[in-house]
Amino acid sequence: MNLYTLLNIEHFSNLKPPNAQQIEDILNVIITPELNKIGLDNKSKKYIWQSEYNSEGIKKIIQFSYRGTRGNFFVGTNFKSVPFVTQNKKLAYYNSKLHLSENSEYFDANKSITLWNAVLFEKSLKKYMRNNFGKKLDFLTDLETIEANIAFAQRQIDSTDFQYKIHHPSPKFVLIYLHEKLGNIAQAKKLKQLFLKEKDDSDDIKFINLMSD
């Protein structure tokens, strides 16, 4: 095996995952300029590129995440009118967290980003940008209205995919507030009752009291 081949494949001899600073630097060189062109910046949070809120209170977000030697992008939306539930069962508003999102596998289950070493990370990131990132941008373009995000949340709720059952926040929780935002008060109350019934089944009394206010 020649040196060129060795440097361009994942081999235990070249396993040296990039550190946090290297990851940030490589992302800022490859990803940030492209996302800046469409109004997403990462001035306030590293690994997160976000827009301003639009007239309906919707913010677009792309977030990079990694575990071990594999990287992932999460793409979705944050809503000014939708709170998060903290670990202490309190409502809080965060403007750089995703309320609704899809990860890279939703767009292409066979494509991944490697962090085996800095060279391979950069190469796979460039390839991913070239071949897959357009799908994510098109996806975000279709999420500029509350109605579109209601459909997004409902699709996840109706799905049999287990990952949506463990999303935080739950798309069921988000959907309540999106209907309230749109003025569908009766529907929002109905969804809240169903959601609280599920929580009641798990004896999460603090949460029920919180949502019932």
Image: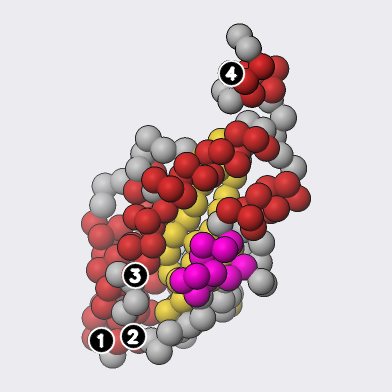
Q: Mark 2 touching mark 4, by CB under 8 A?
A: no
Kindly tell me whether residue 97 is visible in this rendering. Answer: no
Q: Residue at x 67, y 37 (%)?
A: 118
Find disc 3 in the rendering and name its residue: 141
Q: Could you tell which of marks 3 and 4 lies nearer the N-terminus? A: 4
Residues packed near mark 4 inside 10 Å, few (<14), some (14 to 19) or many (20 plus): few
Find disc 1 in the rendering and name its residue: 184
The Cα–Cα distance between marks 4 and 1, rounded to whole angstroms, is 59 Å
Q: Could you tell which of marks 4 and 1 lies nearer the N-terminus? A: 4
In this picture, which residue range is highlighted in magenta?
Answer: 32-42
Q: Secondary structure at mark 2?
A: helix
Residues packed near mark 2 inside 10 Å, few (<14), some (14 to 19) or many (20 plus): some
Amino acid at circle 2:
Glu
Find disc 2 in the rendering and name its residue: 180
The Cα–Cα distance between marks 2 and 4, rounded to whole angstroms, is 57 Å
Q: Position of residue 137 (x, y in %)?
A: 38, 62
Amino acid at circle 4:
Thr
Q: Position of residue 211 (x, y in %)?
A: 45, 77
Q: Mark 3 touching mark 2, by CB under 8 A?
A: no
